[in-house]
Image (tube, coloured by chain):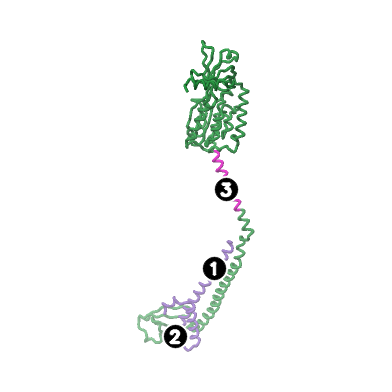
Amino acid sequence: MPKEKKELSYEQARSRLTEITEKLSAGNLGLEDTLKLWEEGEKLAEICQKILDQAQARLEEIQAEYEDEIEEN
Amino acid sequence: MQVRDAARSLADLINPLPAIWIEGEITQAKIRPNSDWVFMDLRDVSQEATLNVMLSKNALKISKITPESGMRVVVHGKPEFWTNRGSLIIRAKSIQTLGLGELMVRLEELKQKLANEGLFSASRKKPLPFLPKKIGLICGRASAAMTDVIENTQRRWPIVEFVTLEVAVQGAKAASEVTQALKKLNARDDIDVIIITRGGGSFEDLLPFSDEALIRAVAQTKIPTISAIGHEEDSPLLDLVADVRASTPTDAARKVVPYFDHEFEMLDKTLFNLRRIVSAAIEREQIFLERLIENSGLDSIEYFLQPYQDQLDQDLYELRENAQAKVQKEVLWLAPTKAQLKALSPVATLERGFAIVQLANKKLLKKASDVKSGDQLRIRLAKDSIKAKVE
């Protein structure tokens, strides 16, 4: 499982994270499972955050290039 | 019929003939001291025709002339057939030199006649070759005119070749020799142009170059011919029939070949002009093309493209907006999700001071018997975690 995490797509990570929060919300888990899911959730959230940050950065980059181009012309 | 009878019959035919005027050139005159008679050969100026003339010294004294070779004369006399020698002789009663005025009148008559035949017309003139390789030159033997033509021509255009025929250019034989030379050159196929030249001389000296037979020969010549006789003011009929008239032998050189240096200068100038013309033509076309494009609206191609560009810009904008919105939506989803995750975690409990002890295999430590001395433990606190070892 830990090795696969890096290869998760945003949608997979998102879907799994949703699943985890739903399970945790149900409140019928022992501490050990809660702890395990929570840690996994944190990592998934981190993955999602990273992907979103990258996407955001890329969008800003493209926008900057575009504006440069307009200025040059 | 005996010779005697035949000769007598001929004498009977000839001797009653009336006296006639005969014009010609003296080629030979024999004046013997012990004779009362002078014998002369009278020859036609251009034709191969000769008559023997005898004249009494008395008649000669009256005429006040001394006959000598080359003299043009008119004699008045009767033909006689001499039976003992079988020869014909003109017994002249008088002799007189042919005056300059008469010669000029004759020349004028001949000129008129030939002009009427069209021999001098401009339409007959052949153009000279631009650059002759071989020039046929007819001139006097070792004459200054020959040197003039050859030297001046080669100074202008050094590589030209001459085929020089040196002939009599004065006297009784001049006309026929020049004519023969002309025919000889015409029979060749390597002569590009012919120059007939002679230096200056008296009116009579230049008469052979107005000879009818020569003029007709020149008129029939296939090779372009230049006449270069005497000086500027001389105008033998050869000048009129020739394709080009040069005033002097030196002038013939100027007319027959271009001046080497001058040609190079011309070439340079021509090249310069050519380039100017070409560049002007290019410029003109450029302007024309620009105007054409302007008028056709081809230069406003961007106006045609503009809607596509606008559409593309719009699409790109929307694409970015969509991407942005999508990311934004996810950000908006993630933040509360993370908050919820935190809320559902044991963090809140830990913040109240509780700690969770995990074994190396991440199992929760629930009773002391699950560990032994030296085991690694991980103690999670609210903020972070510490590692510990069982004593």
Q: CA distance from mark 3 to mark 1?
A: 51 Å
Task: Name the residue at 51% across, 74% down.
Answer: A52
Residue B70, can we see it? no
**Quadrant, the C terminus of chain B:** bottom left
Residue A62: image tag: 1
The numbered mark 2 sits on a residue in which chain? Answer: A
User: Which residue range is magenta in the image?
Assistant: B265-286
Residue carrying label 2:
A33
Q: CA distance from mark 2 to mark 3?
A: 92 Å
Residue carrying label 3:
B278
Farthest residue to the bottom: give it.
Answer: A28
* Amino acid marked by disc 3: Val
Q: CA distance from mark 2 to mark 1?
A: 43 Å
Find residue B297 and report its horizontal and vertical position in percent: 63, 61
Q: Mark 1 packing: few (<14 Cα in 10 Å), some, or many (20+)?
A: few
First of labels 2, 1 by sequence position: 2
Farthest residue to the left: give it.
Answer: B373
* Amino acid marked by disc 2: Asp
The colour with which the image depicts chain B is: green
Nearer the camera: disc 2 or disc 3: 3
